[in-house]
Image: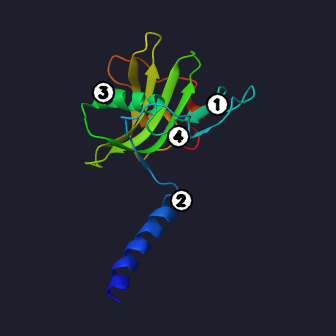
Amino acid sequence: MVIAVVVMPVVAYVAAVQLLAGGRQPEVDTTDIVGGPPSTSRPPSTAGSACPGGWTRPAVGTAARSAPLAAIRAHMGWTDRFVVEEIRTFTGPDKLERWYVKAYQESDPSRQGRWLVRQDEDGQRLVVATAQFDTRGYVARDWRVPQGQGALPTGVAGCLAGT
């Protein structure tokens, strides 16, 4: 009887979280393991589609996932692990690899946001735009470009559809 009193609220809480999250749990970033295939992907699309090159969700523990998180940590001056709500990698119109990341810090959930990270030809990864965690998609008024970065990236809105 006592076990049921303790277990039932926990089960109800987990079920509510699953329902509100659409059945998808956020993934905690683990950057100590490298390798493995992407967890899901969308193949390159046809001409005129929303994301011409398609996008991929890099798997937990892969370099494709840890690279943008490291760039965000450096940009923000944070050191803690992320809980990732959404991460996508795609190629921008300039043929440079980009990542979209929606995440928060594991130990301090108030440290949260959405970031666009670009990998330059020299391999350097830069945060090229940031947005508030509770915004959606790629609406220009929501995104901010770090000082000295120029204008908002173009040609990426379709790749962020549904984010």
Q: Is residue 116 left or right of residue 1?
A: right
Q: How is the image coloured?
A: rainbow
Q: Rounded to the nearest whole Å, what is the CA distance between mark 4 and mark 2?
A: 20 Å
Q: Rounded to the nearest whole Å, what is the CA distance between mark 3 and mark 4?
A: 22 Å
Please report whichever mark, 1 or 4, sits nearer to the chain's N-terminal start: 1
Residue at which label 1 appears = 54
Amino acid under disc 2: Gly
Q: Give the residue drawn at x 30%, y 27%.
A: 75
The quadrant of the rendering that contains the N terminus is bottom left
Query: Closer to the camera, 31 or 13?
Result: 31
Can residue 11 be seen at all in this image of the molecule? Answer: yes
Q: Give the residue drawn at x 56%, y 28%.
A: 90
Residue at which label 4 appears = 137
Q: Are marks 2 and 1 in contact (CB under 8 Å)?
A: no
Amino acid under disc 3: His
Kindly indicate the quadrant of the structure image that contains residue 4. bottom left
Please report whichever mark, 3 or 1, sits nearer to the chain's N-terminal start: 1
Which label lies toward us, 4 or 2?
Answer: 2
Q: Are marks 3 and 1 in contact (CB under 8 Å)?
A: no
Dot 2 falls on a residue whose secondary structure is: loop
Dot 1 falls on a residue whose secondary structure is: loop
Residue at which label 2 appears = 23
Mark 3 Cα-neighbour bin, 10 Å: few <14, some 14–19, many ≥20 = few
Dot 3 falls on a residue whose secondary structure is: helix
Can residue 144 be seen at all in this image of the molecule? Answer: no
Amino acid under disc 4: Gly
Q: Rounded to the nearest whole Å, what is the CA distance between mark 3 and mark 1?
A: 27 Å
Amino acid under disc 1: Gly
Residue at which label 3 appears = 75
Please report whichever mark, 4 or 2, sits nearer to the chain's N-terminal start: 2
Please report whichever mark, 3 or 4, sits nearer to the chain's N-terminal start: 3
Q: Rounded to the nearest whole Å, what is the CA distance between mark 2 and mark 1?
A: 24 Å
